[in-house]
Image: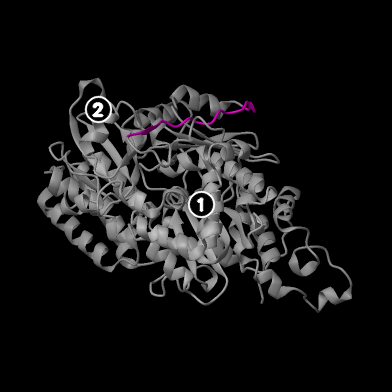
Amino acid sequence: MDLHLRHTTPSDDERAAVDALLGAPRGAWDGGARGDSRDTHLGMGGRDARQQRHLLLPALRALQSRVGWISETGLEYVCARLSVPPADAWGVATFYSLLSTSPRTPRTLHVCDDIACRCNGAVELIGELERVVGPAVAHAPGETHVSVDPRGSAWLRSPCLGLCDQAPAAFLQEAGESPREALLGGMTAARAIELLRSNSSTALDPAIPTTISDGVAILLPRIGPIDPTSLDAYIASGGYQALRRALTIGAAAVIQEVTDSKLMGRGGAAFPTGRKWSAVAAQPVRPHYLICNADESEPGTFKDRVLLDGDPFAIVEAMTIAGFATGCEYGFLYIRGEYPLGAVRMQSAIDSARANGYLGNDILGGGCRFDIEIRRGAGAYICGEETAIFNSIEGYRGEPRNKPPFPAEAGLFGLPTLVNNVETLATVPWIVLNGGAAFAAIGTAQSTGTKLFCLSGNVAKPGVYEVPFGRTIRDLLTMAGGVPDGRSLQAVLVGGAAGVFVRGDELDIPLTFEGARAAKATLGSGVLVAFDDRQDMSQVLLRIASFFRDESCGQCVPCRVGTVRQEEALYRIASGKPIGGVAQEIALLDEIGVAMRDASICGLGQTAYAAIESAIHRVGVLK
């Protein structure tokens, strides 16, 4: 393969960052020094190098973390090490918003301006930053080399960071030999300015989540009272009893319990979990892979962050049970790049479990083989789509694949793959211990068990709420203390940016799959964002439209073009310059929405107009 490298020399920092991940190069053919005379004529290990293509994203992240951006020299060194064409690697590097191919200061503060943070002062915070510090750095990749202060700092506008319960939120990144990342809640202009102007290495305390259970508590009891970093504390609280029972009753019996529970996927698609597990387990091709999808990037969603940060061993145990039941010997935990604490705690839990016989080649002496590897995203909402995750892990742009074939038949690396999100998997240990029938007895006949809901926006007590299926929107808002300051409720966004808005007189909609369908709504990933009468809903819709425009992978025309045209029409309406009047612009939006829904490859384009459509035709915004 001719890589067309320009034989540029990486800096010592760039070389150290990549070599720490990949090991030292063996010769001139993989980025090292020339050895004996054979190096000029014979290349060894090319097939092995190409099989490491899946390490491309980790290598790019390593460069970003060490240097603060990905230079041409760093990129080409990665290409030489992995036998990846530079143009191909450039396409991957520019796909992710947390990776920069233009010079960037080593300290970067990503400030959220998405819908939940906007309800809590993000617009004013950003205005103050623009006045005092200067304009935000552009996200767009560029080839122009500009001079940056190696000790300086900069800030960027960011989509939802998954810290809506502590809005306004920010994400701090510091590049260097000992890189540092922190997700920060309760951000103020004064604190943001201090972070940008200070070179202090003072420890940043992790954000403490708010969690409330109503009735049966399946997922949240350990979060808070139990030390999430201690395996002993997890075992003392009942941890790993479910895995022991699973190994005792056997794989088929575990799948039957999950099937009997009528557990539906909690990531938004609501597919029967037992059916998915059975389909993967039945595949004769080996090996099978398991992916825990922790790339929650839906605006308003933060429940998976709470589970990752607060109960990491439960996720490890749940993945191990799922791997045992479905014949998967290797699992990937794909965590969004903006969750540094979750990544650290999950890696610690994985290491502790492996060291104590709960992961590896002979788990608990039962002959089961299973291990877990963490992969961190780099800022791409689309990678939450189950086939886009495959491409991201394999080292390609995170673009969804056409289906069929379905993941159960041909998923990661073309092999049978089970994909479940964090909440779905975290429910499994309780089901294995207590039985599928006990889980099915909670909730309603069609929506069994409990559900985590993320409440944010204009509510008195934002946080993660675990309730049995069947509670209403009004019940959840009451639990969260209602709308503060005596304000009236204007609308509630249910299901996230891909969900729907409901009016203030529709709060008695039951939060079940069947109840949502009857009300022409969706539970999505469990988002409830409340908007009081102070919020400019036209600006909220414009922010949702810009989110989908930015996050579209661009692979299919309906989504790539439709999301842009949708935002343009909303901008014209919001600025008071509609073409042919507001009614004509709304008619255009409806046409664009139909085209995206019917012709887009994946759910992003298919639902990009859903919330906007409901706001216009159901709530009466813009009319």
Identity of the residue furthest to the front in this view? 248
* Residue 423, percent from left and from top: 42, 48
Quadrant location of the N terminus in the rendered image: bottom right
Task: Tell me: residue 552, above or below residue 285.
Answer: above
* Residue 621, percent from left and from top: 16, 42
Residue 611 is inside the magenta segment: no
* Image side of residue 198 versus residue 623, left or right: right
Q: Please report the bounds of the magenta region as a residue range.
A: 199-214
Q: Mark 2 or mark 1: name the one nearer the start of the chain.
A: 1
Mark number displayed over residue 543:
none
Q: Residue at x 20, y 24 (%)?
A: 487
Relative to the observer, which residue lies in front, 317 or 204?
A: 317
Q: Quadrant of residue 372?
A: bottom right
Q: CA distance from mark 2 to mark 1?
A: 35 Å
Foreground mark, 2 or 1, reads 1
- Counting other residues with Cα less than 10 Å from the Cα at mark 1, is it few (<14), some (14-19), or many (20 or more)? many
Q: Quadrant of residue 303?
A: top left
The residue identified by callout 2 is: 482
The residue identified by callout 1 is: 318
Task: Tell me: residue 165, above or below residue 319.
Answer: above
Majority SS type along the magenta span: loop
Q: Residue at x 66, y 64 (%)?
A: 79
Relative to the observer, which residue lies in front, 355 or 117?
A: 355
Relative to the observer, which residue lies in front, 283 or 576?
A: 283
* Residue 377, percent from left and from top: 52, 52
Element carrying mark 1: helix
Quadrant location of the C terminus in the rendered image: top left
Identity of the residue furthest to the bottom in this view? 41
Residue 609 visible, this angle: yes
Q: Amino acid at mark 1?
A: Ala
